[in-house]
Amino acid sequence: MESKTQPDLGVAMIGHGFMGAVHSGAWESATHSFDLPLNPARRVLVGRGGPATAAAAKRLGWPEVADNWQAVLERRDIHVVDICTPSDSHAEIAVAALHAGKHVLCEKPLANTTEEASIMAEAAERASRSGVRSMVGFNYRRVPAIAQARAWIAAGRLGTIYHVRAAYLQDWAADPELPLVWRLRRARAGSGALGDLGSHVVDLAQFLLDDRVVGVTAIERTFVRERPLPDNGGWGEVDVDDCVAFSGGFANGALGTFEATRFAVGRRNALRIEISGSTGAIAFDLEALNELWYYDAREAAASAGFRRVLVTESTHPYSVEWLPPGHITGWDRTFTNEVADFVKAIGAGEAPAPSFADGLHVQQVLTAVSESASSDARWTPVDIQDRERAEVR
Ligand SMILES: NC(=O)c1ccc[n+]([C@@H]2O[C@H](COP(=O)([O-])OP(=O)(O)OC[C@H]3O[C@@H](n4cnc5c(N)ncnc54)[C@H](O)[C@@H]3O)[C@@H](O)[C@H]2O)c1
């Protein structure tokens, strides 16, 4: 499997919080699990100075630290910049890194606004002409059951797609005493549950259907308007959505209903997606991520029913040679698969997916959702061209 004789791919990772820890493991485990064309070498962990970065580097296994991300862009032994910072810094870091000729893996959502995402997508497109690769970290595409579902849908197993029902349910913000962390501030996070969780389900639905959301109607709510400030006492305003519900139309005619919330008490990390077509349906729940439920509408009604497929066979996507069937995988494994796909694409000189252009389209959907929610759920076309067309009509 792993071959240390392959040319190496020096990695600098920016940020060492939650995603920094998860990505650190993924860079390591990808080489143990997959036959990669290049050998990723974790080289520099970038933080914001102080002892925290050195402590994180020790804990997470990075040999060197830096206190600002600009420093790593000049290094010739760094080929990949992995962005694990909050989304207000994605655009600046990614555009500079691409400009410096570094491949970029950027956490989701791609950016905080459509404008930032457009600039990033343009920079990525320009860089790709010189072989510089970029990818957004929508890791749920790399759940084996999801990849399998996409393959079945592409093969026509569900027939004409009528419905997508997608919900991403968490409950960590339901406690009103929870401090005003960056995820609850518009200036840092762009939006609330919408950008954080909604971006995942929009990407997933578009990925599964290989289709685009073209218009939406949305409602948002902020249930807890003031929260304690994390550092200095006092209170601050929550200026993002706590939850959002929206309906969306797909270009091919399917209807999507979406929900993203941090207030679904008892639901810790439930990403559920169900797709109904003319000849079948699939259902998936992240809290049981090895399972894909499949319904074949062509079977005799008397014995038909959703059946559970355990997506761990060697013939299923992302199977690992040395893992026998039924030896189930976990949430963090999606990041291993993500890193492996990224490295394979770089090695093959191909464009990895999801691209920054895909990330931009998700951002355009999020922007349309916000606009609709702030105008009494008015139907809002997604991309600018569509909107202009609608105004002309
Ligand atoms: N794919 C997923 O399932 C998933 C899950 C959680 C978070 N995320 C995304 O990952 C990103 C980071 O989220 P997180 O949960 O790890 O946040 P976090 O708060 O746990 O960590 C953020 C890290 O970024 C560092 N940082 C911030 N600005 C920096 C700068 N300018 N230079 C260097 N370091 C900087 C912070 O010091 C911290 O180490 C966000 O975009 C978030 O949406 C994705």
Image: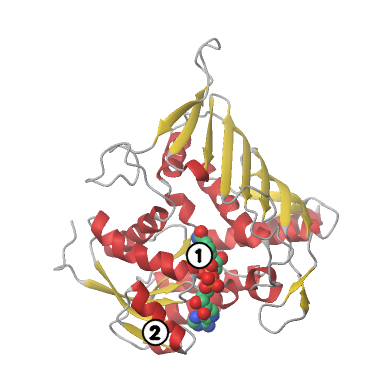
Residue 383 visible? The answer is no
Report the residue that reaches farthest toward the right: 376
Q: Nearer the viewer, residue 51 or 259?
A: 51
Asked if 50 appears above or below 201 in the picture, the reply is below
Percent from the top left, x then y, of residue 16? 45, 75
Q: Which quarter of the picture shows residue 36?
A: bottom left
Report the residue that reaches farthest toward the left: 5
Give neighbour class at mark 1: few <14, some 14-19, many 20+ (Cα, 10 Å). Answer: many
Q: Nearer the viewer, residue 50 or 166?
A: 50
Q: Which quarter of the picture shows residue 82?
A: bottom left
Residue 321 visible? The answer is yes
Amino acid tagged 2: Ala
Give neighbour class at mark 2: few <14, some 14-19, many 20+ (Cα, 10 Å). Answer: many
Q: Which residue is mark 2?
A: 54
Which residue is located at x 47 percent, y 89 percent? 49
Percent from the top left, x then y, of residue 27? 33, 66
Numbered disc total: 2
Image mark for residue 356:
1
Amino acid tagged 1: Phe
* Of callouts 1 and 2, the N-terminal one: 2
Percent from the top left, x then y, of residue 114? 64, 68
* Label 1 SS: helix
